[in-house]
Image (cartoon, coloured by chain):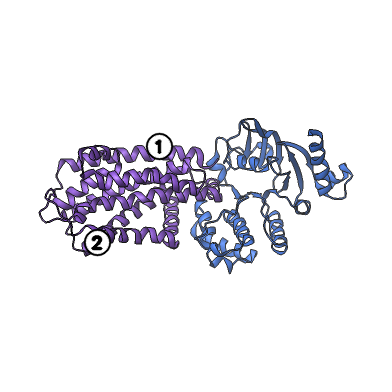
Amino acid sequence: MQASKIGVLTVVELKKLYRDLTNLFVMLLMPVGLTLIFYLALSGVTNDYYPVPGMNHFEYLLPGVMGYSVIYMGMMVALGLTEYRQSGLLKRIEATPVTPAIYLGSQIIAYMIIAVIQALIVLLVARLLGFQPLGGLLGLLLASLFLALLGITAVGLGLITAAVAKDSSAAGGLAVIFILPMMMFGSYLAVFSDMTRNIARFMPNFYVTDSLSVIFHTGGLAEPVIWQNLLILAAISVVVVVAGIQLFKRTAYS
Amino acid sequence: MDRGTPARNGNPIVIQDLTKQYDEVTAVDGLNLEVRQGEMFGFLGPNGAGKTTTISMLCGLLKPTSGTAFVAGYDVTKDGTQMKQHIGVCPQEAAVFKFLTGRENIELLGNLHGVEKEVLRARMDALLAESGFAEAAKRRAKGYSGGMMRQLNLLMALISDPEIVFLDEPTVGMDARARRRTWEYIGSLKEQGKTVLLTTHYIEEAQALSDRVGIIDYGELIALGTPVDLMAEHGAKDLESVFLNITGRRIAEGS
């Protein structure tokens, strides 16, 4: 019975994403646009230190772009939940036999699905633009697992933001605080120096960028670094989402 | 339907010394009240008197600072999830999902209460037909007027066919015609044997609909009785005069 309620609430959240034009734009056009911009700007740039001969800078940064498209989910979660809180919808759901765990579980599932879809849109567009990812189907599944875990982390960060923010406009501003460093260090700057790489290790998406680079650029699925990154990311996602749920439960219905 | 402790004086809502304190402010102050089976109970008071805080505690949305309450026989502080199977709540805000149609909103609430699919469909059709909302319910709530949102808000509270209904300002923002129709509809809930706790700023609404009325001010219950008894007791021609008399006097005493 409780599982079916998670399903019902997940479908509602997915409907919100595809029925609202702004959400649809962020969900579909943002990853497409981001990929095209990176392709136009960087596909002509090459460098000797790239792991595959002939690889261009667009292809080199692509795993970072995929991770970046997922991080944005955190902002959408924060905006959505603060809006629900303001409109009284959270209280309405809380007054039914649905527990907060069921409700928040549906949020995690819905946004995890969207996160993986968004990142795969980036990969699909890149593929159409000539990128040849290695790793085969298994590599794709492994990459999806990384993206799903990053999606869970993003939802956790969104919950923390929604717990702290008083309204949706404050939530939008606060979300930038975690999005910006993740975007800069976790997605793009890690490659430039030891210092930026060390800072990037504090960003959850770094472990996605790093692993997806190995998967898609070398096809080395058995590389120990992938599994090491998977463990670290799984631990981060659990810590962040549990902290997010606890904080949000404390403030959501008051 | 199963219940927690059916004995609780046989009354579906029993409130015992219920208190809610926020820092220096006492929103609800040692409230004692019982609402009887099948009763339409008008819960009145000025803004900030403690009506919504009381309802929030009864619905398991807020933890009391002290005291307790039993709803459908369940202790609201301990058996909230079971208690919520028996209640329908129409909140003060028009809490609807705007990207869903009216039907989808109502269906969602039915699903969250665990109503069987076939029962839900039949009940929704009946509810929409009775309320005259069937056509509007096909459209997304985003395009609704404030009054239509309110109507939907109410229907969402009733789809689970609850034994106990909490209506917090259900007609605020409605035009006169919609309000009259909604009053009639709320009146029909009593005929269905439901116990209703209604808060409203329309005192004439409370007078017309309520079997008994409780007036709360500064978190304390300051009057309780049938509208007729309260009018007789205060020598007033209507309930509004009673309300103004009691709450106005307290303001004067406090100043």
Q: For the image shown, how many numbered marks are present on the structure? A: 2
Residue A121 coordinates in the image, percent (x, y): 29, 59
Marks 2 and 1 sit apart, C-alpha to C-alpha, by 40 Å
Residue type for callout 1: Ala
Of all chains in the rendering, the one displayed in purple is A
Q: Residue furthest left?
A: A53
Mark 2 is surrounded, within 10 Å at the Cα level, by few (under 14), some (14 to 19) or many (20 or more) other residues, namely few
Residue type for callout 2: Leu
In this picture, residue B171 sits left or right of residue A116: right
Colour of the chain lettered B: blue
Q: Which residue was labeled with disc 2?
A: A40
Residue at the (21%, 62%) spot, across then down: A127
Q: The disc numbered 1 marks a residue on which chain?
A: A
Residue at the (26%, 48%) spot, across then down: A188
Mark 1 is surrounded, within 10 Å at the Cα level, by few (under 14), some (14 to 19) or many (20 or more) other residues, namely some
The foreground one among A181 and B95 is A181
The foreground one among A56 and A111 is A56
In this picture, residue B241 sits left or right of residue A229: right
Q: The disc numbered 2 marks a residue on which chain?
A: A
Residue B204 coordinates in the image, percent (x, y): 78, 53
Q: Which of marks 2 and 1 is nearer the N terminus?
A: 2
Q: What element carries label 2?
A: helix
In this picture, residue A225 sits left or right of residue B90: left
Task: In the rendered structure, find residue B38 and report the number of the disc placed on it.
Answer: none
Q: What element carries label 1?
A: helix
Q: Can residue A111 be seen in this view?
A: yes
Residue at the (44%, 46%) spot, across then down: A173
Q: Do the residues labelled 2 and 1 touch (CB within 8 Å)?
A: no
If the image is split into quadrants, where does the C terminus of chain A sit? top right
Residue B192 sits above or below residue A160 on the image: below
Q: Is residue A3 visible?
A: no
Q: Which residue was labeled with disc 1?
A: A243
